[in-house]
Image (spheres, grey):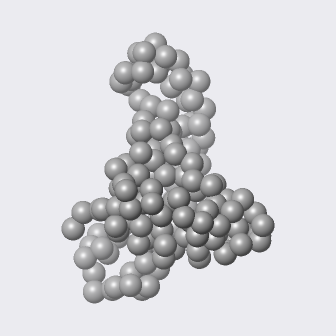
Amino acid sequence: MGASSLKYLQLLTRWLPDIVQQFPRGATIYFMHDRAGIHHGTLVKNWQSQKEAREISGRKVKMVKWPPYSPDMNPIETVCAQVTSLFERLYPGLSNSKYTGWTLRMGIQEGVEHCWELLDSEYSENRAKSMPERIKAVIDAKGWYTRF
């Protein structure tokens, strides 16, 4: 079953309040999502325009749109790909396991955190240090594809 605006909205309304409660009352939280269709579908746009989406548990939430997927300009994409690759290798079948609900969520969370910890910090630092070269490559390519 694929992702949809309805599923995304259900995730937002279920988990966003828990997430924002980790910040001090009165804080402004910037919630970022990319330009994936499910992130700006009619259901999600309607929800974002409602007061309850802009203030959750006494904290202001500002929705920030990211540009379309662009790994050239977003080195975290390659870091996330590394985490995903490690997760799939170390935790095969977790998503098809007997676990459901909270138990499955915790298993995935622990697995992702474990994989993140396994990453070599030099890998992430090199991605960040490559930004000037990435920016130049995108400019030289006039916004088209680069080697990154």
Q: Quadrant of residue 78?
A: top left
Q: Nearer the viewer, residue 148 or 7?
A: 7
Identify the image quadrant of the N terminus: bottom left
Residue pictured at 38% horizontal, 62% vertical: 43
- Where is 28 relative to 71, above or below? below
Q: Decide if residue 83 is in sight here.
A: no
Residue pictured at 59% horizontal, 24% vertical: 132
Q: Decide if residue 108 is in sight here.
A: yes
| Residue 18 placement (x, y as % from top left) | 59, 76
Residue pictured at 78% horizontal, 67% vertical: 26
Is 64 placed left or right of 58 in the picture? left
| Residue 130 placement (x, y as % from top left) | 55, 29
Identify the image quadrant of the C terminus: top left
Q: Nearer the viewer, residue 67 or 119?
A: 67
| Residue 147 placement (x, y as % from top left) | 38, 25
| Residue 67 placement (x, y as % from top left) | 47, 38
Identity of the residue furthest to the top in this view: 140
Q: Quadrant of residue 83?
A: bottom left
Is 59 placed left or right of 84 in the picture? right
Is 9 placed left or right of 94 in the picture? right
Q: Nearer the viewer, residue 99 or 65?
A: 65
- Where is 21 relative to 139, above or below? below
